[in-house]
Amino acid sequence: MIEEQRKDFLECERSRVFCLLMISSGLLGAFTYSIRGGVFCNAQTGNVVLISMALGNGDWKGAAYYLIPITAYGLGAAATELLPGLVKKAGLLRWDTMLVGFEVLVTLFLGFLPETAPYHISQVAINFICSMQFNTFRRAEGFPMATTFCTNHICQIGISLAKGLKKKDKIFFTKCRRHLEMLFMFITGAVTGTVLCGLFLGKAIFFGSFLLFIVFIDLLHADLTKEKGMLGRVPEGH
């Protein structure tokens, strides 16, 4: 069942927040694959395939190489199960806000690294924050959404379109449109990231920092004003 649309969503559940996160994730995906070692840091299916191929070819060193981003991704997910409770007890800001602020700092740090720095630094850091983001931002205004990869968005576009045509229910067309928006945002970020990486190499990640900073300011403002009394409220999907 698809939930009815409401107007009292938390700021961290707003579609505009998810759109900016999708653009930044597309950029990070292009960044790590094009100039930071040819690995996928937004999700791990590609890396699992690559490590499996390395094992099949007897390339133990290559397999160990892909184990690094996979492990970092798992640790990021674990962190999101342990840290939000501590943040909630502090009662200062929402976990979502602090996470995006942390992402800003991480991407700024990576942008200032010299081009000669080991790729592992960028891979581990981006895998870690992408995993944390994926496990934190789960629903955009009632619709299940992922902010770091596109597989489910593509599936949901097809599913929603088919159901909309079959059941003649506009909610499915709305869902289809939302997933199309997310896919477009990711592609926009990846295209932009590819162009910027070609022009500025590692400094291209600063554009991702800028987008994340906008999200951080938006969430911070909500925490300190209209949602100040709702810091303990859990977003949908958790």
Image: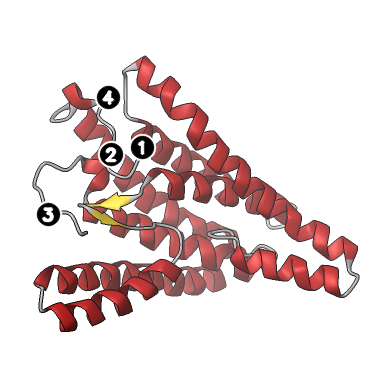
Q: Could you say whether the residue bearing mark 1 is in a helix, strand or loop?
A: helix
Q: Quadrant of the N terminus?
A: bottom left
Label 4: few (<14), some (14–19) or many (≥20) C-alpha neighbours in 10 Å:
some
Residue that numbered label 2 is attached to: 235
Which residue is found at the position 68% from the left and 57% from the top? 115
Please name the residue shown 33% across and 58% down the image: 145
Image point (52%, 48%), residue name: 131
Q: Secondary structure at mark 3?
A: loop
Few, some or many residues within 10 Å of mark 2 (<14, 14–19, 20+): some
Q: Which mark is residue 96?
A: 1
* Label 3 or label 4, whichever comes before in sequence order: 3
Which mark's residue is nearer the viewer, 3 or 4? 3
The amino acid at mark 3 is Glu
Seen in the image, is 137 located left or right of residue 195? left
Towards the viewer: 221 or 114: 221
Identify residue type, mark 4. Answer: Gly
Classify 36 as above or below 58: above
| Residue wearing tag 4 | 232
User: In 3D space, how far apart are the residues under numbered discs 2 and 3 (Cα atoms)?
Assistant: 16 Å
Which numbered disc flags the more N-terminal residue, 3 or 1?
A: 3
* Residue 128 showing in the rendered view: yes
* Disc with the residue nearer the chain's start (4 vs 1): 1
